[in-house]
Image (spheres, helix red, strand yellow):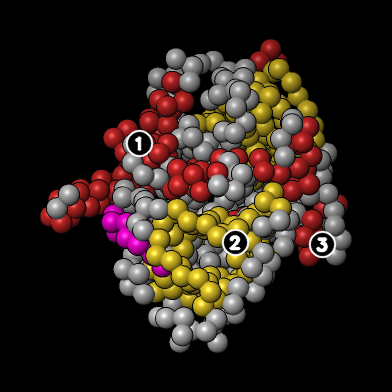
Amino acid sequence: MSPTDQDDLVYAFDIPAEQPWSRILKKGQTLRIIDSEGEQAVDALIYVAGDTAERYSAQDTLRVQGSAYLELGTRLISNCGRVMAQITADTCGRHDTSAGCCSCESNAVRFGEATRYLHACRENFILELSRHGLTKRDIVSNLNFFMNVPIEPSGNFTVLDGPSSPGNYVDVTAEMDVLFVISNCPQVNNPCNGFDPTPIRVEIRQTPAA
Amino acid sequence: MSAQGNAQRAAANRRRYEELRAAGQELKQLPAPTAMDGAPITKDAIVQTEQVPPGWHATVRLSRGEALRICDDLGRSSASLLAWRNEDPCERINCADTVKVQWSAALSKGRMILSDMGRVLLSMIEDTSGAHDLLVGGSTADSTLKAYGEVTRNTQANFISAAAKIGLGVRDIPPCVTFFAPVTTDATGRFVWHGERKRACDFVDLRAEMNLIVAVSNCAHPLDPARPAATTPITLIRHRLPPPAADDVCRTASPEALRAYAFTDQLFA
């Protein structure tokens, strides 16, 4: 896809497997996250660009929506109750915001000490946030695009195989200027990304897709 | 690593994942709920008692090994809770890991509440209710405006106030757990409120596994149709406990629990 046939494409980048990324998304701009090879979980944090104490809140988002999963039309709510962004396109259909991100520490608890010294999203987030003057304190809740985490009426909670196919994408349109941070999930211990991290593509357009 | 090596590693990881899931879900034997008249606290074990009026909040410091009883006195309240490690408040409650590690969004007796550092903050050693919320969180100015047509006292404001009084800020307020909030999801993921499961005098006993600062907010849960005026006091009782037995149900509930408590104990080794 070249800028000539997508006039409003202002940015595109392939985030390598296991790597973090961040960029300011201006109000009205749309971030397209493309799961290039399929079955990849994409962990994300969102902050208000001018005041990072205001940030994405999973619980506020779930409460306002009345539902445990993110989908087309979901408004992403801040800890101050404001709409930061909205999911404006979605070819996958299933995204999570309850399961958090992997970390060296939680991996060691979940899968044993042998998994402690592996790449993890929290490490990615800390490194990427450090470029913006933010710290571990600022990782309070995150989104997991393309991650299938069904919650049963019993409460049973499982991370299932990544539901996305190669080329599946989700569009997030900013309702205010936001700092968007991604960890291209390095997790190799659960099936959220088929135990095999792969690259993803991010594209920013001036307007939502028609 | 070769493609074949990668495939073998992925297959081994999947096998381990499925084994842990079976242990965490299919074979899990959790204890029965505490009886309403069970687990009495003797007078000499009580360190501190506080009744929190509707709409208000309290902050309690707990030493490792002490417990906090939270009682829904008249069965009309919910108690939202945050916890930070006393010596390093950068370590705090992590609802997502609490759910993920235990393969369940349903808290009940025998469960643990985890920090973001793979350690246990609180053990649910007693629980009469078994109906708590880890997903939706507490009330906010917006939720009360929407529900009641006015901004009332709410958990979000309570937590900001509680955090400020111990030198923390909005950045230090992660998702919270809410006790006595019977929330489940239906088959499509919609949240459902089960008000009939609430009873007067329901209580939980939370044993501190490290030195903690705990903030508790007494506000109606945002899914609770009760108006704020209908909510009632909660009682907080900080009390001493004997050391956990070798077969302590929380500490031995699963392979994940064994590891989480071992990592926590290392802080005090």
Q: Where is residue B33? Give x, y as percent.
A: 53, 38
Nearer the observer, A56 or A15: A15
Q: Amino acid at mark 1?
A: Arg
User: From which residue to which does the magenta span run?
Assistant: A194-201
For discs 2 and 1, the disc positioned in front in the rendered view: 2
Res. A151 visible in picture: no
Secondary structure of residue under mark 2: strand
SS assignment for the magenta stretch, majority: loop
Is B138 placed left or right of B210 in the picture? right
Marks 3 and 1 sit apart, C-alpha to C-alpha, by 45 Å
Residue at x-position 45% and y-position 87%: A5
Can you tell which mark lies on residue A186? none
Q: Where is residue B130? Give x, y as percent.
A: 56, 44
Secondary structure of residue under mark 3: helix
For discs 3 and 1, the disc positioned in front in the rendered view: 1
Is A27 placed left or right of A145 in the picture? right
Residue at x-position 43% and y-position 66%: A13
Res. A10 visible in picture: yes
Q: Amino acid at mark 2?
A: Ile
Q: Which residue is mark 3?
A: B145
Q: Which residue is mark 2?
A: A24
